Each structure stands twice: as structure tokens, then as C-alpha cells.
Image (tube, helix red, strand yellow):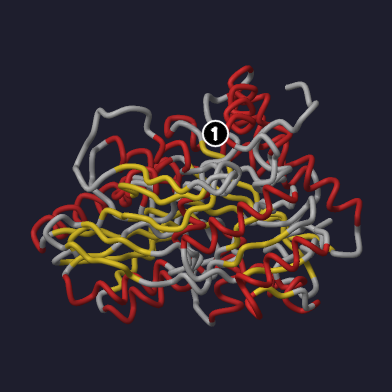
């Protein structure tokens, strides 16, 4: 717990931008999924790197934990203050600092969301492509090494962050990366910070790589009688080298939810949702080749979204799948888990996931960014039934173990947070202890997002 001296020192810097109000603390103590309410002692709203550094020095002196907060869209309890302390809300640090169109780079503060950034970029002919579905903050996306619907074409945050400004646990400010296209200079500290989930430093500035807005875009949705055929179609498309910008799978339960919540009339069977980017000629060719694969695999009810409005509606529906699923079962909560497997094992993995969920007696739609082998299960649970939550945790654990046996990973997108920390030893072995050693070297007092990702003090991996 922070003492009176800490509050006095913090008040000098932040004034009314440090809040102990119950409403603020509870807002920043909630998760998107099943984790219980975990309010911090206070919430701080910094406006500059210098303020974050000053706060961190005070927290280090008083051993007060610090947890970064972006848009609060994480699914594994990443931003919950499980050890108390301060949540640092970056929503006031939301500016575009510099656009360099000739270098295809943009420098931003961490609180800006991806949608807001792309609105700012419209006149440049460039855009930032990483799309996790939620309108997440870019600082949060970097901290969790986010990916999403467009990863199959443009890569994840790992591929699209050129540099960072980071405040370390002792208040030092470092800058990683450069504006050059590549570098062989020293350790790649940018990569180290990406995916560290705020356990190694607080990101206060990002330099991002941009891409040209495509000349032509084409989107479509098509139905399949069997999910195996839909997933095998994805494998065929990838193996044939057909360039897709998005290729998403939704099962029959999701299609049913879409019809119920969005007023659509999709066949209540598995579907693929796909999008192509490029020149008019390349998009036309890719669309034709994709259509041929779909026909060969038995796909039907092929519907093209030919206008911007139709495409926007299609992807808004896909991005809203989680909230639609929650709304479709009033009063429920979600345990959302994801795994990622080699594309050659994808059909088998989805089939086994479906069987596990059904055998457990759970309602659990499956969807995912299957172009890169990543899929999600949305387990819809009765809030008043602890046995159902326990069963769902077991299923999530078994899904992760299945992915490991297939040469995959326990999470392709959601990250570790608290929800999957216990499985890190199974995936990484002795390397998990190395991660803990890095954490101890950079944050010896364990004040940065304690209880997440790495082994804790005294915990033997």
C-alpha cells in the first residue's frame, strides 16, 4: 500500500489527474472476460514521457506497483492491478507526433487507437494495418505484441513497430530502434519490449511502419457444409500462394449468432470471410483463384461485398463477434482462449477443439484468423455457476496443451497476462526462467505489472 508521503509527492506532479475515486478505480479494475473486479489504489492520467518517468521514480522509491492501461480490451487480465498500486491510464497521451510519408513511418503516443490513427492518415495514402478487431490503443497493442485479421498479409506488431520510447522501472527513459529499414546494431530492445505486457517498461512513444492504401479491395463470405472443408480451404489457399489480406473462419454457432444479433440470413453453417488488397488486376486474379478453390472444396452461397459500405458492414460484424456472442446469452460472461498451430495441423486442431468443448457440455463458438493458424474459442458461462467456470478453465488448458503437442503455441494473439502464466513452463521450459532473469535485471523491485507473464520471486519454474 502507498503511504502518505507517496501520495503527497504524486499530487505535486499530477494534481487532479491522480484519482482515488471508486468509479475510476473500479473502471480500471475490470476485465473484458471472466476475471473478478480488481481495482487499483488509484489511477493516474499522465500527459508526457517526463511525467511517466517522474511517477516511476516515486513508485520505485516507495515500492508501489505500476500497471499500464490502454483501452482495457485485453482478454487475459493483463492490466489488472493484482498486487495493488497504481494504474497508469495513457488515454491523455493520444497524439500523432510526426508523419513521415516518404519513409512510411509515423510517430505516435501510446494512447491513440488504431482507428484514430488511420483517420489521421487518410490524406497521406498510407495506413497502419494491424487489426486485432477491438479498437485497441497502439501502446497496448505493442505491449501485447498484437496481431489480428490482417496478419496473414501485413504481419503483427512485431513486424510493424520500428522503435519505442520506454520508461524503465527506475525511471530511466530509453529509445529503441531507428528510422532505418534495418539495423545490426546491438540487442533488439524493441523486440524485447514487444509482448512484455508492461513487465519490463512503460511504452510512452511508438514509431510505426505504414503501408500504402490498396488501389482495390474485394471482400466475400462463403458457406461450407463442414468446418473441415472450410479449414482445409484455408490451407489450400495459403499453400497455393494466393495473396489474401484477411481470411477468417467462423463456425455454425457464430453464424447463428450473426443472424440473431445482426439480422443477417447466413446459412447456419461454417463460413469463411475473406478480403483481397492490391491492384485491380491482382485482386481480380486472386478472387478468381480463391473462387476456384472454394468450388473444389464444396463451398457455397458465395457473396461478394462489392461496395465500401458492404465491406464495412461485413468486418464490423466479424469484429463484433465476441460482444454478439455475449449478448446472445443474457447474463453470461466469457472465457476467451486462443491457440496457434502450424497451418498443416489446423483442420485437426479445430476438430479436436470442437470435440473438447462439446464433450465438456459448454457453449463455445469457434472463430479465428486461420490464415496464420490462429483460432479462438469463446466459452459462454453462467456467472452464477462456478463449476462451469472451472470446466471452462480445464478446457482452455487442454486446448493449449493440444497446441503444444502439435508444435504450436499456447497463444497466438491474446498474450499471457494472468490467465496463461501457469502454462509458460510447459511451452518454454528453461527459457521461462531466462525471461524471469531479464525481468529481475530490469525491474529488481518487481513494481512493473507484477504477477504477469514471468516467474515470481521464489517461484521455481
Residue placed under numbered mark 1 in the picture: 348
Whether residue 322 sits left or right of residue 38 in the image: it is left
Up-down relation of residue 185 to residue 139 (above or below): above
Residue 26 image position (x, y, % from top left): 77, 71
The residue at the point 30 percent across, 73 percent down is 305
The residue at the point 72 percent across, 73 percent down is 27
- Looking at the rendered structure, the secondary structure element under dot 1 is helix
Whether residue 380 sits left or right of residue 239 in the image: it is right
Q: Quadrant of residue 233?
A: top left
The residue at the point 32 percent across, 51 percent down is 294
Query: Which image quarter holds the N terminus?
Result: bottom right
Residue 349 image position (x, y, % from top left): 56, 36
Q: Quadrant of residue 248?
A: bottom left
Identify which residue, 317 or 139, lies in the foreground.
139
Whether residue 105 sits left or right of residue 135 in the image: it is left
Query: Which image quarter holds the C terminus?
Result: top right
Identify which residue, 272 or 86, lies in the foreground.
86
Residue 270 image position (x, y, % from top left): 51, 56
Up-down relation of residue 454 to residue 133 (above or below): above
Residue 40 image position (x, y, % from top left): 77, 63
Amino acid at each position: 500500500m502507498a503511504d502518505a508521503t507517496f501520495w503527497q509527492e504524486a499530487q505535486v506532479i499530477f494534481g487532479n489527474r491522480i484519482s482515488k475515486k471508486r468509479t475510476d478505480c473500479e473502471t480500471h479494475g475490470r476485465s473484458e472476460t471472466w476475471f473478478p473486479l480488481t481495482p487499483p489504489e488509484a489511477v493516474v492520467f499522465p500527459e508526457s514521457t517526463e511525467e511517466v518517468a517522474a511517477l516511476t521514480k516515486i513508485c520505485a522509491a516507495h515500492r508501489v506497483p505500476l500497471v499500464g492501461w490502454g483501452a482495457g480490451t485485453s482478454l487475459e487480465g493483463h492490466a489488472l492491478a493484482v498486487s495493488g498500486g497504481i494504474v497508469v491510464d495513457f488515454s491523455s497521451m493520444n497524439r500523432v507526433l510526426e508523419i513521415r510519408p516518404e519513409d512510411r513511418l509515423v510517430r505516435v503516443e501510446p494512447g491513440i487507437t488504431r482507428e484514430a490513427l488511420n483517420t489521421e492518415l487518410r490524406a497521406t495514402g498510407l495506413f497502419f494495418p494491424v487489426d486485432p478487431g477491438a479498437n485497441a490503443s497502439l501502446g497496448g497493442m505493442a505491449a501485447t505484441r498484437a496481431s489480428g485479421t490482417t496478419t496473414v498479409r501485413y504481419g503483427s506488431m512485431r513486424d510493424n513497430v520500428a522503435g519505442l520510447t520506454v520508461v524503465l522501472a527506475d525511471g530511466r527513459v530509453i529509445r529503441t530502434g531507428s528510422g532505418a529499414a534495418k539495423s545490426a546494431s546491438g540487442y533488439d530492445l524493441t523486440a524485447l519490449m514487444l509482448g512484455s505486457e508492461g513487465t519490463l517498461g512503460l511504452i510512452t512513444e511508438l514509431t510505426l511502419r505504414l503501408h500504402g492504401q490498396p488501389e482495390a479491395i474485394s471482400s466475400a463470405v462463403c458457406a461450407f457444409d463442414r468446418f473441415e472443408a472450410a479449414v482445409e480451404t484455408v490451407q489450400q489457399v495459403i499453400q497455393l500462394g494466393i495473396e489474401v489480406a484477411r481470411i477468417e473462419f467462423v463456425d455454425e454457432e457464430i453464424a447463428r449468432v450473426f443472424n440473431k444479433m445482426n439480422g443477417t440470413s447466413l446459412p447456419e453453417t461454417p463460413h469463411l470471410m475473406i478480403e483481397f488488397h492490391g491492384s485491380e488486376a491482382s485482386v481480380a486474379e486472386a478472387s478468381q483463384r480463391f473462387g476456384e478453390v472454394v468450388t473444389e472444396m464444396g463451398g457455397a452461397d458465395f457473396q461478394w461485398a462489392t461496395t465500401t459500405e458492404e465491406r464495412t458492414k461485413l468486418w464490423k460484424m466479424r469484429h463484433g463477434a465476441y460482444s454478439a456472442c455475449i449478448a446472445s446469452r443474457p447474463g453470461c460472461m466469457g472465457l476467451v482462449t486462443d491457440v496457434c498451430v502450424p497451418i498443416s495441423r489446423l483442420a485437426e486442431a479445430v476438430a479436436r477443439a470442437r470435440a473438447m468443448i462439446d464433450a465438456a457440455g459448454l457453449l463455445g463458438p469457434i472463430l479465428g484468423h486461420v490464415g496464420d493458424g490462429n483460432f479462438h474459442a469463446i466459452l459462454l458461462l453462467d456467472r452464477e455457476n462456478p463449476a462451469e467456470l472451472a470446466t471452462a478453465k480445464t478446457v482452455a488448458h487442454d486446448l493449449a496443451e493440444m497446441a503444444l503437442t502439435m508444435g504450436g503455441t499456447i497463444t497466438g494473439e491474446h498474450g499471457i497476462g494472468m490467465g496463461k502464466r501457469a502454462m509458460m513452463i510447459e511451452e518454454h521450459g528453461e527459457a521461462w526462467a531466462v525471461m524471469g532473469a531479464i525481468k529481475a535485471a530490469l525491474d529488481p523491485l518487481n513494481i512493473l505489472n507484477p504477477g504477469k507473464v514471468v516467474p515470481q520471486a521464489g517461484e521455481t519454474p
